[in-house]
Image (cartoon, rainbow, N blue to C red):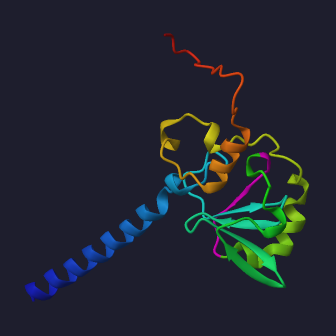
C-alpha cells in the first residue's frame, strides 16, 4: 500500500513540476523580440502590423502575409514592402494562436493605426537591462547601414561620458 501511495505522490509531483515548467517557459521571451518591437511586453507571440497588413511570428522570426489568397510565411517582408521601415510603424501585440485567421477583424479594428508609430517606443531605443540581449534582425542591420554617416561629419554624441 505504501508503494502505491508513494508512486501516486511521485506521479502527482512530476505532473505538477511539468506544469510549472511549461508556465515558466511561456513567461518571458524578450530576448527573441525584434529591435523594432514595442517596449513593455515580457512575452509576445505575434505582432500585427497595420501599415503593411501582415503579422510577424516572434518565435520563428517570420512575417505572415497573404499571397495569392493563401497565407505565406517568410523571413523577409512581403515583396511589395521590401523597403518598408518597421521602426516607423505601429505594432499590435497578439498572444493568441494563429491570429491571422482573424485577419478581417484585425483589419477593421486596427486600421486607424496606419501611418506611423503613434507614440510607440521601440526596443532598439530602450536602454533597460531587460532589453540588452534582444534579437537583432537583418532589417535592423539594413536600417543602421542606411542611416549611417559614411563620411564627412564624424561627430558622435557621447552622452554623459567624458574623456
Q: Where's residue 115, x and y in %?
A: 89, 50
In the rendered image, the vertical position of residue 112 relative to residue 116, given as above or below: below
Question: What is the quadrant of the N terminus in the image?
Answer: bottom left
Q: Where's residue 16, x and y in %?
A: 32, 72
Q: How many marks?
A: 0
Residue 112 is covered by the magenta coloring: no
Q: Where's residue 102, x and y in %?
A: 78, 76
Q: Where's residue 111, x and y in %?
A: 89, 60
Highlighted range, magenta: 88-97
Q: In the picture provided, is 2 more to the left or to the right than 28?
A: left
Residue at the front extreme, as displayed: 151
Residue at the top extreme, as displayed: 163
Residue sitting nearer the eye, 102 or 20: 102
Task: Identify the image quadrant of residue 21.
Answer: bottom left
Residue 37 visible within the image: no
Residue sitting nearer the eye, 163 or 121: 163
In the rendered image, the vertical position of residue 82 relative to residue 10, given as above or below: above
- Could you tell me which residue is drawn at 14 percent across and 81 percent down? 6
- Could you tell me which residue is drawn at 54 percent across and 51 percent down? 42
- Could you tell me which residue is drawn at 51 percent across and 10 percent down? 162
Residue 38 visible within the image: yes
Our reading of the magenta stretch's main secondary structure is: loop
Q: In the picture provided, is 30 more to the left or to the right than 48?
A: left
Task: Identify the image quadrant of residue 64.
Answer: bottom right
Q: In the picture provided, is 78 more to the left or to the right than 40?
A: right
Amino acid at each position: 500500500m505504501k508503494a502505491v501511495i508513494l508512486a501516486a505522490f511521485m506521479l502527482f509531483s512530476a505532473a505538477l513540476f511539468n506544469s510549472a515548467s511549461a508556465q515558466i517557459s511561456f513567461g518571458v521571451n524578450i530576448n527573441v523580440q525584434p529591435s523594432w518591437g514595442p517596449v513593455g511586453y515580457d512575452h509576445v507571440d505575434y505582432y500585427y502590423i497595420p501599415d503593411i497588413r501582415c503579422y510577424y511570428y516572434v518565435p520563428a522570426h517570420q512575417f505572415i502575409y497573404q499571397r495569392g489568397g493563401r497565407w505565406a510565411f517568410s523571413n523577409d517582408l512581403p515583396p511589395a514592402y521590401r523597403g518598408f521601415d518597421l521602426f516607423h510603424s505601429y505594432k499590435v501585440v497578439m498572444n493568441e494562436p494563429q491570429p491571422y485567421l482573424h485577419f478581417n477583424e484585425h483589419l477593421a479594428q486596427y486600421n486607424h493605426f496606419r501611418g506611423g508609430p503613434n507614440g510607440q517606443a521601440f526596443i532598439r531605443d530602450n536602454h533597460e537591462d531587460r532589453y540588452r540581449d534582444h534579437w537583432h534582425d537583418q532589417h535592423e542591420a539594413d536600417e543602421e547601414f542606411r542611416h549611417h554617416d559614411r563620411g564627412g561629419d564624424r561627430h558622435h554624441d557621447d552622452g554623459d561620458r567624458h574623456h
